[in-house]
Image (cartoon, coloured by chain):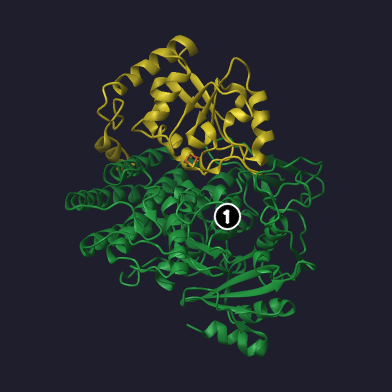
Chain colours: A yellow, B green
């Protein structure tokens, strides 16, 4: 136990003021996100992530925004297990044919008003997998999309920025 | 290096012929008559070879029908046994009775190539879902990849357990967390799992078919996206198979740089998974601590190599990015920092009784099962199978680096975690060695055009385990077939078996301790 406490104190708080890159434009994201979420979502934006066929690269970065460095929860963003509680669907992948029905069902299970954000080059337009017998292309081929976050995969900062854009902050 | 070949030749005599279309000399290839295909498997099994993969290729462009290939491994040897299947009788003898691992490979061959494995007890589709038309075989040349696949009525026949008090839990394809989609079906009694059946294929994006429409260079970007967390591993395996096919000799520096990337990928993923395993037993502090370390590695990757996961930095012919003296210093300093920080966390993991209680004796994959299922990578090494391509089939520069990996026999969640702890330590050591040795020179070499009707094979050790690629050139030297075998294709079988007798709530941590790729499996 003593080791655990020691480690906690030694580490301190590693969460960074956003963003770690020196781009003055981006410096604003954190406070803006917080502000927009406060205003529009009563402090809490619940996101349901759906992998509709990704290569799992995008998932790695979505995980990263939950790590202690980006710590998206401090802005009121949290990931929920059920679409029923979600304000936003964060969807990755090209939509694979085998996920099409599941994606539609998840969309229908999400109560309106809802936002859909397509993540990654694949989510935006099918990316390298394009359109074929097995891949239907971008998310907007299957459900209505409100915003896209390009990148392969988009960096954690780009993800936070894209979420901000989607909620109109 | 020809013992496996001799073994088959002794049994099959003149019926087994050498296949000279395979390019690298490190891999032997034999062609055997169709009716003796399974006999070769039996002989190899008797002599302790394991099945590494089984796949088919449409060779009608060469007026030959189809080729069915089985790849075996024993110690440092690989042997590919091929048999030819005519267009008018598309069947081949199943190997499932000899090697359980063949079970899904063959269902996949049947689903995607339309060849029937005679003797395989399971004729349900795999990867292909039940609502595809039965005669849609995407890997055949006659199949138009651009067509939309219609939906037909169909139902998947699940294995059922019946009896009083037995209930079923369906999970997925959309899971609760941020993970890939797949469907798991548990039959349980009280809390105990009686059976688990996986149904995958949800993220099938037609990758193998798509390879065939790309040039050899373009396809490297596709290989990098087979499974995003293994982008270096897949790029490397693809690149090596193309280099084998074309006889490209790499500059020394490129080889060592690739090892640097590969080990960094291994460390990053192991750190992430160790954290996630702890989180699944409600020990969140280590999730955040391990992820803090991982994040720093990814950032260094971004500054030095231009991408957090080093995507597209391994290409056929070499590496796409170099490192300078400053970069070497940065990584060496980072490794010192990492080693220090990592050891502190390992002690916390190791000393915590509540973690220990959950991870020990949970999700046991027994050594016999591991052998029967031919699992690979850290899953195999946690269950007593000493398999690692860096040691047994060393690709440069591993032929000059001594790699030590632990082999444990308990096969539980703890063993799979602990093997990775040791691997992180070892990778830190390897990275230091690579940076000390890094030879001067070019980082890439142009790759020549392949001659028609040749094939190249590569096996490398990604962080999950052995990745196999087998590429075949078509009549004009284009990609005729690119077979991808991610470690997950075999290790998913291990998860199904290890869960018997465990309680349903322990499934997440068991699953995490395997952390198999859905995308790499579904392709
Ligand atoms: S955008 Fe890139 S990382 Fe994301 S799913 Fe597509 S290929 Fe993978």
Q: Is residue B172 visible?
A: no
- Residue occupying the point 24% across, 51% down: B331
> Is A162 above or below relative to B86?
above
B238 vs A27, nearest the viewer: B238
Pointer 1: what residue?
Answer: B212
The answer to whether the residue bearing label 1 lies less than 8 angstroms from the nearest atom of ligand 1 is no
Secondary structure of residue under mark 1: loop
- Between A118 and B348, the residue placed more toward the observer is A118
Is B119 displayed left or right of B234 in the figure?
A: right
Please give left or right for residue B14 compared with residue B73 in the image.
Answer: right
- Name the subunit of mark 1: B
Residue B356 location (% of width, % of height) = 46, 50
Q: Position of residue B215 (x, y in %)?
A: 50, 54
User: Which residue appears farthest toward the top when viewing the image?
Assistant: A39
Residue A54 visible in this rendered orientation of the protein? yes
Q: How many marks?
A: 1
Depth check: give the residue in front, B395 or A125: A125
Q: Position of residue B44 (x, y in %)?
A: 61, 79
Q: Is residue B488 above or below residue A23?
A: below
Query: Between residues A25 and B400, which one lies in front from this camera angle?
Result: A25
Quadrant assignment, res B55: bottom right
Residue for point 45% across, 23% down: A163
Q: Residues within 10 Å of mark 1 (few under 14, many from 20)?
A: many
**Residue at figure coordinates x 69%, y 34% from the top left:** A101
**B41 w.r.t. B455: above or below:** below
Q: Position of residue A62 (x, y in %)?
A: 45, 34
């Amino acid at each position: 136990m003593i080791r655990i406490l020691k480690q906690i104190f030694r580490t301190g708080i590693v969460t960074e003021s956003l963003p770690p890159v020196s781009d003055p434009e981006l410096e604003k994201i954190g406070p803006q996100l917080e502000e927009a979420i406060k205003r529009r979502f009563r402090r809490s934006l619940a996101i349901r992530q759906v992998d509709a066929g990704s290569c799992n690269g995008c998932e790695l970065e979505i995980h990263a925004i939950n790590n202690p460095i980006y710590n998206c929860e401090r802005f009121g963003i949290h990931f929920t297990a059920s679409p029923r509680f979600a304000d936003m669907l964060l969807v990755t992948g090209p939509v694979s044919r085998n996920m099409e029905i599941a994606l539609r069902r998840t969309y229908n299970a999400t109560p309106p008003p809802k936002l859909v954000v397509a993540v990654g080059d694949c989510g935006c337009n099918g990316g390298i997998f394009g359109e074929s017998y097995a891949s239907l292309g971008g998310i907007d081929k299957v459900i209505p999309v409100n915003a896209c976050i390009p990148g392969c995969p988009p960096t954690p900062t780009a993800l936070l920025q894209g979420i901000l854009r989607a909620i109109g902050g | 290096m020809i013992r496996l070949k001799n073994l088959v030749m002794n049994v099959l005599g003149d019926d087994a012929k050498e296949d000279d279309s395979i390019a690298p000399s490190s891999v032997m290839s034999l062609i055997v008559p169709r009716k003796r295909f399974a006999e070769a498997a039996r002989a190899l099994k008797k002599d302790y070879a394991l099945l590494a993969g089984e796949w088919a290729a449409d060779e009608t462009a060469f007026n030959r029908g189809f080729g069915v290939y089985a790849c075996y491994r024993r110690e440092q040897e690989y042997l590919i046994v091929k048999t030819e299947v005519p267009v008018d009788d598309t069947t081949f003898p199943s190997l499932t009775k000899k090697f359980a691992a063949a079970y899904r490979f063959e269902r996949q061959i049947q689903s995607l190539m339309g060849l029937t494995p005679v003797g395989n007890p399971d004729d349900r589709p795999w990867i292909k879902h039940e609502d595809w038309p039965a005669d849609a075989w995407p890997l055949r040349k006659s199949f138009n990849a651009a067509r939309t696949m219609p939906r037909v009525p169909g139902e998947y026949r699940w294995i059922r357990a019946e009896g009083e008090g037995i209930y079923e839990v369906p999970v997925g394809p959309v899971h609760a967390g941020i993970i890939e989609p797949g469907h798991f079906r548990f039959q349980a009694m009280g809390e105990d799992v009686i059976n688990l059946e996986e149904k995958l294929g949800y993220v099938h994006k037609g990758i193998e078919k798509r390879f065939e429409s790309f040039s050899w260079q373009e396809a490297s970007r596709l290989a990098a996206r087979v499974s995003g967390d293994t982008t270096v591993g897949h790029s490397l395996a693809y690149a090596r198979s193309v280099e084998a096919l074309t006889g490209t000799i790499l500059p020394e520096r490129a080889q060592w740089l690739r090892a640097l990337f590969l080990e960094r990928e291994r460390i990053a993923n192991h750190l992430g998974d160790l954290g996630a395993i702890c989180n699944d037993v409600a020990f969140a502090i280590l999730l955040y601590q391990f992820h803090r370390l991982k994040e720093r590695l990814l950032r260094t990757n971004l500054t030095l190599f231009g991408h957090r996961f080093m995507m597209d930095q391994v290409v056929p012919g070499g590496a796409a990015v170099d490192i300078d003296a400053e970069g070497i210093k940065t990584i060496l300093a980072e490794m010192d920092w990492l080693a220090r920080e990592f050891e502190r966390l390992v002690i916390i993991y190791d000393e915590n009784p509540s973690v220990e209680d959950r991870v020990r004796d949970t999700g046991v994959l027994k050594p016999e099962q591991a052998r029967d299922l031919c699992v690979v990578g850290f899953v195999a090494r946690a269950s007593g199978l000493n398999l690692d391509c860096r040691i047994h089939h060393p690709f440069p520069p591993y032929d000059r680096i001594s790699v030590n990996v632990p082999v444990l026999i308990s096969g539980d969640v703890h063993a799979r975690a602990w093997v990775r702890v040791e691997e992180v330590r070892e990778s830190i050591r390897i990275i230091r060695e690579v940076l000390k040795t890094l030879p001067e020179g070019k980082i890439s070499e142009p790759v020549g055009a392949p001659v028609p009707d040749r094939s190249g094979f590569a096996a490398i050790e990604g962080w999950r385990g052995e990745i196999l690629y087998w590429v075949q050139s078509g009549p004009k030297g284009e990609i005729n077939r690119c077979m991808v075998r991610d470690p997950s294709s075999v290790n998913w079988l291990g998860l199904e078996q290890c869960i018997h007798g465990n309680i349903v709530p322990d499934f997440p941590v068991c699953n995490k301790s395997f952390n198999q790729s859905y995308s790499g499996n579904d392709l």
